[in-house]
Each structure stands twice: as structure tokens, then as C-alpha cells.
Image: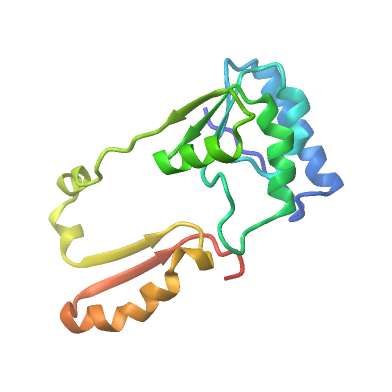
């Protein structure tokens, strides 16, 4: 089954957000899970923490150190609240794992690197209709450090050589 938690308030720190987190926390506690896994931690999850502290908890760490212009006191608070209770951490690259081990050496919990296989296998799953055009895709959070401005500036040069290309920029916008 899949269950969703919907926050009515757009603010992470609000009475409504903490009430919603408490309802979600009680739901999780009633499930009595074997493991609680966070693909990322957010300020909205703070209210869940008291309900899950007795369960093994694992956290995926996408960026151990904030990128340029992305420092936030909220991320520091989240690390201090959640990391001590984690039984282990997952990383999507060897670089991220090394960076975490360097800057957060006081956390001795298990650390795992997730290795992705090449995505070229997906070409075999596509039908001929979907292969009519060539696409250049950017997906992820839209943020200055990711170089989207470089991609946009390169589009005219690419189109001169490959006039049938299509560009898709897809992601959550953090005001960039």
C-alpha cells in the first residue's frame, strides 16, 4: 500500500505542520516497521522523530556539504536532530560518502554506497514512436550550482549542429 501525508500549511514550522507530523508519526508507530528510511530529511519530519526513535533508522545523504549558496541553518538543525539516531547512511556516490566521512567523522554508524547501473538498458524498452526525436534532458532541483544557465546558453550552439534536438528542463524550482 501507499499512504500519503499532506501538509495543509506551506510553512515547515507551524502548528499545523507539527500536528500533521504527529498524525503521521502515530501512523508509523502503529505500523511497527522493521526499518524507517528517509530518502531525505526535511523540517516537516521533525515532528515524526519522537515516534520513530525506537526503530532502526537509515538516511540517504544526497549532499553532505551544502553547495555554494545553499547553506541553511535548517539543514544544520536537521543533521543535529536526525543523524545521532540513524543506524546508517546511504550515499549515491563515492564522492559523497568520502565527503561525509571527512566532515562528519564523529558519526560511526554504517555507511553504504548505492551504485546505479548504466541507464542505456532503457533504450531497449522504448518503442519506435518514442524514439522519433532526440532529447536532451535536465532533471533535478533547479538551483544555481547545477549549471542550468550553461545549458541554456549552449542550446543555440547545439541546435546549429543538431537542429532536431529537443530540450527538457524538469525539476522543482527553489526560486532560481
Seen in the picture, residue 56 relative to 40 is either above or below; the reply is above
- Image position, residue 102 (x, y; %): 54, 38
Q: Residue furthest right?
A: 15
Residue in view at x 59 percent, y 53 percent: 66
Q: How many marks?
A: 0
- Position of 75 with respect to 60 (left or right) is right
Colour mapping:
rainbow
Seen in the picture, residue 16 relative to 142 is either above or below; the reply is above
Residue in view at x 43 percent, y 40 percent: 92
Q: Can you see residue 73?
A: yes
Residue in view at x 39 percent, y 74 percent: 150
Closer-to-camera residue (166/56): 56
- Position of 175 with respect to 139 (left or right) is right
- Image position, residue 119 (x, y; %): 25, 45
Closer-to-camera residue (127/38): 38
Residue in view at x 77 percent, y 54 percent: 11
Q: Where's the C terminus, which quadrant? A: bottom right
Amino acid at each position: 500500500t501507499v499512504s500519503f501525508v499532506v501538509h495543509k500549511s506551506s510553512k515547515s514550522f507551524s502548528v499545523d505542520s507539527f500536528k500533521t507530523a504527529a498524525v503521521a508519526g502515530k501512523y508509523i508507530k502503529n505500523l511497527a516497521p522493521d526499518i524507517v528510511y528517509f530518502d531525505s530529511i526535511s523540517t516537516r519530519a521533525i515532528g515524526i522523530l519522537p515516534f520513530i526513535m525506537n526503530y532502526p533508522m537509515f538516511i540517504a545523504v544526497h549532499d553532505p556539504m551544502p553547495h555554494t549558496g545553499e547553506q541553511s541553518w535548517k539543514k544544520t538543525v536537521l543533521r543535529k536532530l536526525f543523524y545521532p539516531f540513524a543506524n546508517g547512511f546511504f550515499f549515491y556516490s563515492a564522492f559523497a560518502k568520502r565527503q561525509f566521512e571527512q566532515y562528519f567523522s564523529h558519526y560511526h554508524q554504517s555507511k553504504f554506497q548505492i551504485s546505479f547501473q548504466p541507464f542505456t538498458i532503457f533504450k531497449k524498452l522504448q518503442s519506435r514512436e518514442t524514439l522519433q526525436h532526440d532529447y536532451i534532458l535536465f532533471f533535478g532541483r533547479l538551483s544555481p550550482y547545477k549549471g542550468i544557465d550553461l545549458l541554456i546558453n549552449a542550446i543555440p550552439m547545439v541546435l546549429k549542429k543538431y537542429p532536431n534536438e529537443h530540450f527538457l528542463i524538469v525539476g522543482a524550482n527553489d526560486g532560481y
